[in-house]
Amino acid sequence: MTKVLVIGANGSVGRHVVASLVEGGHEVRALVRDAAASSLPAGVAAFEGDLAAPESLTAALDGGVDGVYLMWPGIPVQPRVVELIAEHAERVVYLSTDVPDLADDEPAVVFHQEIERLIRRSGTAWTFVRAIDFAGNALGWADQVRTGVVRWPYGRARRSLVHERDIADVAVRALTEDGHDGGKYVVTGPESLAHAELVRIIGEELGTEVRWEELAPETAREQLTAAWGNAAFVESRLRAWESFTREPERVTDTVEQVLGRPARSFRSWVRDHAEDFR
């Protein structure tokens, strides 16, 4: 049995990490902002804390843990958090993104690179689960799916969106097995599918017609900046999507290599989340 602290236990990936660890008979602690409002499996010990206040992690780490699953929300990096984890945990599995090891000027990439550097220098064993964009981001289309038309830019952009359960399964394997120290696992879906194809699959699984309507990048820039409130992030997304019309988002066999089975398809993700679109 392994003792694991899950930071981000209520997240789209973290909740599956918790469930899998419990199912495997491991001792699980969960760091949450509000224990009373959290829905955790029986037997999971909830500790209230916030990465913005590093010392709030002390109780959850007290006595030491075998591993920590770390998801960092989009808040400023606190080096003390990594120091505390290194002082109390034998290993950390960090949910990162598909970042290059070399410097990059994309804000999201710089953010994850900084945390990875802190972890590498901390002295504790580590594994980075570098996930391609989540299939869950397709829920951003849910309101449009209900109208029967999805208006979005770059319908030919080919994506390799990954099911959050595959990310969680890889993370759990790294937390509970030997042989994953120093791993930089780029986790993707099993194939790259164009935006317009993703929308078609959603419609097929829901049993309704959902059309794709190409949205001009200029219009998308204006709408997404108003919706997301971060012009730099919108610009980076538009650049990435445009690049995927020329060169598809890469596909890896990481899930199969780590878990011994193929990655879950986007269609299977839609089936798991059909009610979220209705």
Image: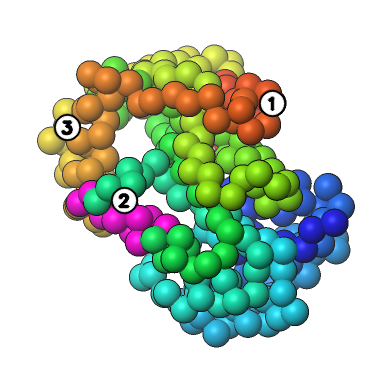
Q: Which residue is mark 3?
A: 217
| Mark pair 3, 2: CA separation | 22 Å
Q: Which residue is mark 2?
A: 109
For the residue marked with disc 3, what is the amino acid?
Pro
Q: How many marks?
A: 3
Up the image or down, 255 lies above or below 46; here it is: above
Is 24 in front, or is 240?
24
Q: In the image, which is nearer the foreground, mark 3 or mark 2?
A: 2
Residue 10 is situated, as x and y percent measured from the top left of the image, at: 62, 58
Q: Is residue 42 left or right of residue 177?
A: right
The reply to whether callout 3 and callout 2 are in contact (CB within 8 Å) is: no
- Residue 260, disc: 1
The reply to whether callout 1 and callout 3 are in contact (CB within 8 Å) is: no
| Mark pair 1, 3: CA separation | 40 Å
Q: Main secondary structure of the magenta part?
A: helix
Q: Residue 155 falls in which quadrant of the image?
A: top left
Is 199 in front, or is 240?
240
Neighbour tally class for label 3: few under 14, some 14-19, many 20 plus, Cα within 10 Å:
some
Up the image or down, 142 lies above or below 59; here it is: above
Q: Quadrant of the N terminus?
A: bottom right
Is 222 in front, or is 4?
4
Residue at the farthest left position = 218
Question: Which residue is drawn at the image coordinates 17% and 32% (left, top)?
Answer: 217
For the residue marked with disc 1, what is the amino acid?
Gly
Q: In the image, which is nearer the foreground, mark 1 or mark 3?
A: 1
Up the image or down, 224 lies above or below 41; here it is: above
Neighbour tally class for label 2: few under 14, some 14-19, many 20 plus, Cα within 10 Å:
some
Is 234 in front, or is 1?
1
Question: Which residue is drawn at the image coordinates 48% and 43% (left, top)?
Answer: 184
Q: Under tag 1, what secondary structure?
A: loop
Residue 32 is situated, as x and y percent measured from the top left of the image, at: 63, 69
Q: Which residues are magenta?
A: 104-116
